[in-house]
Image: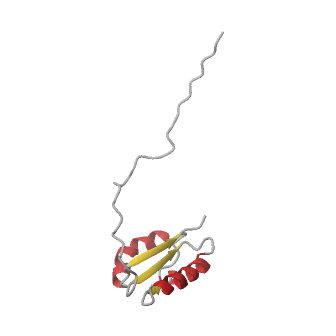
Amino acid sequence: MTHETRYRVYWPRAERADAVRQPAPRPETLDGKTVAFLWDDLFRGDEIFALLQEGIRSRYPSVSFITHETFGSTHGSDEQRILAELPEKLPRLGVDAVISGMGC
């Protein structure tokens, strides 16, 4: 005698809420550009961003940086507000590129 068992299977992902967007065009150079750092306060971003600044500046001497402290943590109790403010804040600060660090 065989016993048949049936299970309902659910796909673990939800339907896509947003259409896939093309990324913004990359600047041809970072010379004379302003790069902002965003961070979620996890996994050594403060150390890594210092190394990135040093490496980027060695290649593009006239680059400037806006540190993650300017924006606040992109994770935690204020993340919704901080992320909502970015579309207005980035252009106002003259940001040309963003490096966003995420912990794991």
* Left or right: 51 as drawn, with respect to 70: right
76 or 42: nearer the eye? 42
x, y percent for residue 60: 44, 85
In the displayed structure, 41 sits above or below 20; it is below
31 or 19: nearer the eye? 31
Colour pattern of the rendering: secondary structure
* Left or right: 26 as drawn, with respect to 100: left
* Left or right: 82 as drawn, with respect to 47: left
User: Picture quarter containing residue 44?
Assistant: bottom right
x, y percent for residue 27: 35, 76
Residue placed at 43% from the left, 75% from the top? 98
In the displayed structure, 7 sits above or below 62; it is above
Q: Quadrant of the N terminus?
A: top right
x, y percent for residue 34: 40, 84
In the displayed structure, 17 sits above or below 31; it is above
x, y percent for residue 51: 58, 81
User: Picture quarter containing residue 41?
Assistant: bottom right
- Which residue is outermost to the bottom? 62
Q: Quadrant of the C terminus?
A: bottom right
**Number of disc labels:** 0
- Which residue is outermost to the right? 1
- Which residue is outermost to the top? 1
Residue placed at 40% from the left, 71% from the top? 84
